[in-house]
Amino acid sequence: MSEFKTVRGMRDFLSDEAEMLRYVEGTARRVAGLYGYEEIVTPVVESYELLAAKAGEEVRSRMFVFKDLGGRDVALRPEFTASVARLVATTLRNEPRPFRLFSVGAVYRYDEPQRGRYREFWQSNYELMGSKRPEADAEIMLLTDSLMRKAGLNRFAFKIGHVGVLRGILNQEKVEDKTQSAVMQLMDKKQYDEALRKVEDAGVSRECMTVLRRLVEFSGKDVLAVAGEIGVLVEGYEKAVEAAKNLREILGLLLESGCKTEMTVEAGFARGLEYYTGLIFEVYVPDMDIALGGGGRYDRLIELFGGEPTPAVGVAHGIDRIMLGVQTQKNAQRLEKAKSAMVIPIKEELRGEALKIAQMLRDASVMVEVEVMGRKMAKALEDADRRKMDYAVIVGERELKEEAVVIRNLRKRVQETVKIQRMTERMENQSTA
C-alpha cells in the first residue's frame, strides 16, 4: 500500500502547535468578548454565487469550487465577510443596529504553499455593521491592536489607506467599475506601472494621470500630515477630498485613543477584495514579509445581497500567521496548564480504584492519565516522565487500607504518602519547578 500524505497546502497540527493555535483562537474570542462582539458560526460551504459576488478576481480564481450532488455550484469559504453579510441581509435583517459579530474557523484558498501561506488556514473575523461613523473604523483597528498585544506580539505595525481616494478620482473620470477593480488588483500586487497604464488606456485626463502618479509614491509615518497632504493633492476630485478627510478623522481618533502602534499611510495602498469602499488597513510584523491581518470598510455589500443599506467595517486576522509572528519574535507566552498526574495501580486488582482516584483528581481540574498498558512501576514512571507529567499517583494495597496514596513529585524526585481526600490540596501547595 502506498504511503498516504496530507493534501498539498494542508497540514497536521501536533499537540504543541494545536495548543498554540487554540491559545491564539481563545485570545481572539476573549478580545471579542471585551469589545462586545457576539460569536456566530457560519457554514464552511456556501453557494459559489454568494462567495464570488464581490470577492475580487484574485480570490475568485483561487476558490475551491465544485458541484454538489444536486448539481449546484458551491465553494469552500475563502473568507468570512460574505457569509456574515448574507446572515445580516436575511435572518438578522430586522434586528437593531449596530451588529458586532465575531467568527473563527478555517478558510480555504488555492494559493501556492509557502512560509505563512497554506490552502487551509485559520482566521478570526470581526464585523461592525450599521455605523458609517469614523469611530467604528477606529474601533476595528483598536481591536486588532488589542489582539496582537494579548496574543504575545510586541513589534507590529499598521499600513493604512483609503479606497475612497482612488475610487473618487476614477469615478469622476468615468472609469467603469470593472476596470477600477482590475486597477485595484494590480495595485494590491504593487504592479503600479501596469495599473497606471490600464487607467491611461481608459481615456482619463492628463491631470488624472499626474495625480495618480504622485499618489502611488506618496506615503509616510506622520499619518495626520500625510492624510492632510493627500487631501490637497486630490483637490478638484470632490469624493476623493471627502475620503482623505474621512481618513484623517479616523487617524485622529486612533491617536486620541492613545494608540501608540507604528502606522504608515500609503496613498496607493489597495487590497484584493472588491467590496471595500473606505478605510483599508493591514497589520504586519516588520521582520516578516506577510500581513497578519487586514480589513476595512464596505458599505454596499449587504445591500448587494438583498438587505437594507447597511454601512459596515470589518477585519480578519490570520491565526496561524499570528502564531508564526509570536514564534519569530521568540515571545511565546507560557501557556498556563493544569497540574498533571499519571495514576499508576501497583496490581491489576487495583485498576478500578485507580480509575476512581483519577476521576476525583479530574473533578478537581487536574489533568490525569491512567497507566493502561500494564507496565511495571519503573517503566510506568519512566513513561510519566516522558509525558512531562508533574506527579505520579501510585495506588497501592497497603496505602489504600489507610485511605491514602503515594504522590511522587516528578520534578523534584521526592514522594510522600497522602490521604486521598487531601491529594489535590497537597498538589496545589507543592511546587513542581
Image (cartoon, helix red, strand yellow):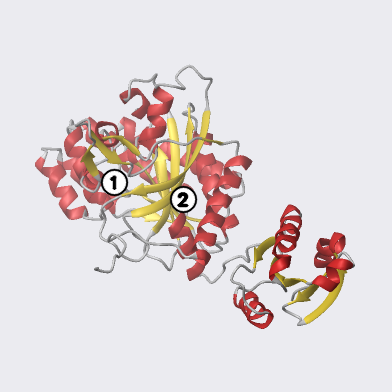
Q: Is residue 258 above or below residue 33?
A: below
The percent coordinates of residue 167 (x first, y second) are: 28, 36
Give the crowd class for mark 2: few <14, some 14-19, many >=20 residues within 10 Å.
many
Relative placement, left or right, of 335 versus 423 is left
Residue 76 placement (x, y as % from top left)? 31, 42
Compared with residue 406, is residue 420 higher up or lower down, i.e. above or below?
above
Q: In the current view of this chain or complex, which residue is farthest to the top?
A: 94
Residue drawn 29% across the image and 31% down it: 50
Name the amino acid, label 2.
Val
Q: Which residue is mark 1?
A: 272
Q: Looking at the image, which residue sits at the far right?
A: 402
Report the residue marked by disc 2: 223
Identify the image quadrant of the N terminus.
bottom left
Q: Is residue 270 left or right of residue 319?
A: left
The answer to whether residue 310 is seen in the rendering is no
Residue at point 18%, 49% (across, down): 195
Front in this rendered view, residue 176 or 27: 27
In the drawing, does residue 200 fall left or right of residue 323?
Answer: left
Mark 1 is on which residue type? Gly
Disc 1 from disc 2: Cα separation: 23 Å
Image-quadrant location for residue 402: bottom right
Q: Position of residue 91 (x, y in %)?
A: 44, 22
x 87%, y 62%: residue? 422
Which residue appears at 48% of the width and 38% of the height?
137
Nearest to the observer: residue 15 or residue 37: 15
In the rendered image, which quarter contains the C terminus?
bottom right
Q: Which of the two labelled residues, at mark 1 and mark 2, occupies the earlier sequence position?
A: 2
Q: Secondary structure at mark 1?
A: loop
Residue toward you, 337 or 111: 337
